[in-house]
Amino acid sequence: MRTRIALAAAALPLLVTGCASVPPTQHSGQKVLSGSSVTPEASPTPDPTPTADLTLGYRRPVYHDKPRPTLSSAQQDAYGDCPATQLTNGSKGACATLLREKLAELGYYDGPTSGRVNVAATNAILRYQRSRGLPATGNAGEQTWYALASEQPARSEDLPPECTIPGVVLCVDQAHDTLRWLRDGEVLRTVKVRTGGFTTEPKTGKWRVHATVTGFYRVYNKHRNPKSENYGSGAMPYSVMFDPNMYVHYSADFARRGYATASHGCVNIGSKDDAVWVFDNTPVDARVLVY
């Protein structure tokens, strides 16, 4: 998108995906973004989720300040003063261009590198932050810059032990945008997914980060075409319901736009074949781990 998202967000079409029958809950760890104000990149405080089943020991990650990595002379020259620069949606300039170039090299961004940081770039920042275990704010501050400059590796793709318990488990890895469907500890299908990100409030049209809940859940219901207060019927086909506000479901928007946009918290599947398969093969009472 070449339009100025932060200054003219009203000109953009609203996302067509839906994320529940009621508006998503605002979590304490979410960061509100705008083009006119900068939310510092900080460590969010994990919030309680009453619907999560934590009996198997799963706990949300707690972000700790890590020692700043030492950059080589070449890395310092390549990044200059950018690690001291805070970028948010709507930012522009040489550091904003460099950020998008680096995210494009890593495969998180596919769009223009000049002009203002747009919605696609903000969602690329979020995906990169999740992949490196950084606070997912959508703003690029010192932690994000140093991770990029030092070429910090992505988080491990190893399955948490909660995913390998007996029965059916949907293991949603936000760091790698994947849902792995397991039965009795064996991965039988791996699906690319999209989770919450920088998008508009469904009723107010205001832009902010919508986070996907993390925790260990049970599937309490399934519906082929649930109605949403925000989007009506047809927005969330093949819904596997694990949280009152967030489902696993097929998303036509994800199929069409990919990771340039984001969900309002639901776990989106962009392949209808995959969505139907997950729906048909996931029983009520199956477990869901989102991490």
Image (tube, grey):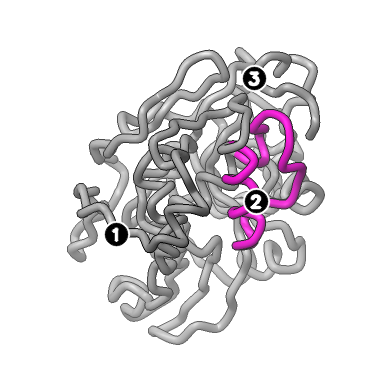
Based on the picture, tell me whether residue 111 belongs to the magenta stretch.
yes
User: Residue at the spot x=49%, y=49% of the render?
Assistant: 79
Q: Position of residue 14 (x, y in %)?
A: 74, 26
User: Residue at the spot x=61%, y=31% of the render?
Assistant: 199
185 lies left or right of 56: right
Q: Amino acid at mark 1?
A: Thr
Q: Position of residue 25 (x, y in %)?
A: 42, 29
Q: SS class of the residue under badge 3?
A: loop
119 lies left or right of 134: right
User: Residue at the spot x=64%, y=32% of the render?
Assistant: 117
Q: Amino acid at mark 3?
A: Ala
How many labels were placed on the picture?
3
State the separation of the CA atoms marked 1 and 3.
Answer: 34 Å
Residue bearing the label numbered 3: 6
- Of mark 3 and mark 2, the one earlier in the sequence is 3
Q: SS class of the residue under badge 2?
A: helix
Q: Is residue 267 above or below residue 185?
A: above
State the separation of the CA atoms marked 2 and 1.
Answer: 22 Å
- Discs 2/1, front: 1
